[in-house]
Image (spheres, rainbow, N blue to C red):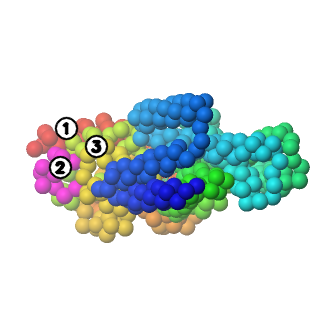
Amino acid sequence: MGSSYVILYFLSSVFFILGIKMLSSPVTARRGNLISFSGMAIAIITTLTYVKYDLNSIIFIISGISLGGIIGLVFARKVQMTSMPQMVAIFNGLGGLASSLIAFSEIIKVSNSLEFNIVSISILISVLIGSVTFSGSITGFLKLQSLITGKPILIPLRNYLNLLLLIFIIGLMVTSFFYSGNTLFFYILISACLVLGILIVLPIGGADMPVVVALLNSYSGIVAAFTGFIFSNIALIISGSLIGASGLILTRIMTKAMNRSLANVILGGFGATSESIAADTSNKNYKSGSSDDIASLLEFSENIIIVPGYGLAVAQAQHSLKELLDILTNQDKKVIFAIHPVAGRMPGHMNVLLAEANIDYELLLDLDQVNEKFSQTDVSIIIGANDVVNPAAKLDKNSPIYGMPILDVEKSRSIVVIKRSMNVGFAGLDNDIFYNEKTLMFFGDAKDSIDSLTKSFKELN
Ligand code: NAP
């Protein structure tokens, strides 16, 4: 590889790093995406210019790029925001599969006889992580898409079984340096890795899957970096490491905001509760109101905080919410949004949803910024959120969400909760906020409820 390739790969890596940095703010995110895209274009073109081709390989490369590009474009345009975790799962899975197949083709190239060196070790690790990422991601996709049950599938002694399988795989990898030339041997290796990926993801509850998808995203980066070592390709090593590190950071942010350890997510069992389970409300009283009641409350409120949650995304109520926001701000009300880091079902879910409706990102405050504002707030409107406002996280040491940072809505003067019923949310827990004397429940689908609230408010003004 000449020095010009190294410079171009270095340049593309700089573009990746700048692009990722710019993704951290909504103001620069679009440009960041474009810069990362340019980095990838430089890396691909650079790679294509130093490979020696025959006509057949050119046809293969062009058809691969065109077909993959078209499929990617169609899916990216069609996918619903609530289905984004599935889409990312598929992308990770294909990334893992690509690395695994590339590594496997290297094994075939040397007639299945590996010498003990760093390249061969990278090949074997690529096969292991790539295959686990592929089958794990596909299993995650099937769960998220409800094509198989989203509940944890708990095979007895599963952790011992997984450990045994991993030892078997490592044994095969070590043996492959001494026992060469046998294709069947490597087919057994790749099959065992695929089975391991499935077994790791099966016990994880469907609703925990976004965390696992973030982790698998990290794996797909790590495996790309190992594939980079096989070909001494610095662009692949750097970009793979970036994905590996950012996937791990994201996983950490999500588990921290959910107050769970990564081990707790991976070992499975949580999230087994169905979202349609009704909470035991027999001994508790709550007040419910109509759109007219809430419109009058808003009429006399100056400072309003809106707390969006998963139900807002389910109801696709973001555009209705923007309409309500506009009429409230036209009446000189100060409205801000409280964004919890794990509201919804994927990182940044609420930010993306509200951005879709052109809600000014400057109105979106995160947990640390907004919590001090609740005490000066006239009314907090919780829309389809539950766990992220559950005071049990602060008060009940036995609660599974104890320790999770939450939005302090109970400090506001009054509270409105828009949801369809008294049903629990993701963590399967009842929520004392619903029975708070300051709270008015407004039952119904988030979109219908916001629309009727907007109508009532317009009638008042
Ligand atoms: P949540 O606790 O799951 O509660 C959502 C609420 O929305 C439910 O109680 C449901 O009540 C209501 N809802 C559903 N559909 C609705 C509709 N069409 N209209 C109105 N309301 C509707 O949601 P959250 O407060 O956003 O908390 C997120 C949870 O997901 C956290 O526990 C978090 O740890 C977890 N999680 C988040 C991520 C992430 O990255 N963001 C990833 C994995 C897990 P009804 O059925 O009564 O309507």
The residue where tag 1 is placed is 455
Q: Which percent across, then down, holds residue 328?
A: 17, 49
Sequence-wise, which precedes: disc 3 or disc 2?
Answer: 2
Q: Earlier in the sequence, mark 2 or mark 1?
A: 2
Alpha carbon separation for disc pair 3 and 2? 16 Å
Q: Which mark is residue 251?
A: none
Q: Which residue occupies the foreground of this view, 32 or 370?
A: 32
Q: How many residues crowd around disc 2 within 10 Å: few (fewer than 14), some, or many (20 or more)?
A: many
Res. 292 visible in picture: no
Which quarter of the figure has residue 367? bottom left
Distance in Å between CA atoms under marks 2 and 1: 12 Å
Q: Residue furthest left?
A: 461
Disc number at residue 357?
A: 3
Residue type at the position of mark 1? Lys
SS under mark 2: helix
**Residue drawn at x 73%, y 60% as measured from the top left:** 118
- The secondary structure type at the circle numbered 1 is helix
Number of other residues with Cα within 10 Å of mark 3, as a class: few under 14, some 14 to 19, many 20 or more = some
Query: Which tag, 3 or 1, sits closer to the chain's start?
Result: 3
Depth check, mark 3 against mark 2: the one in front is 3
Magenta stretch contains residue 332: yes
Would residue 286 appear left or right of 48 to someone viewing this image? left
Please identify the residue farthest to the bottom as the structure is shown.
372
Q: Amino acid at mark 2?
A: Leu
Q: Nearer the viewer, residue 153 or 395?
A: 153
Q: What's the magenta region?
A: 325-336
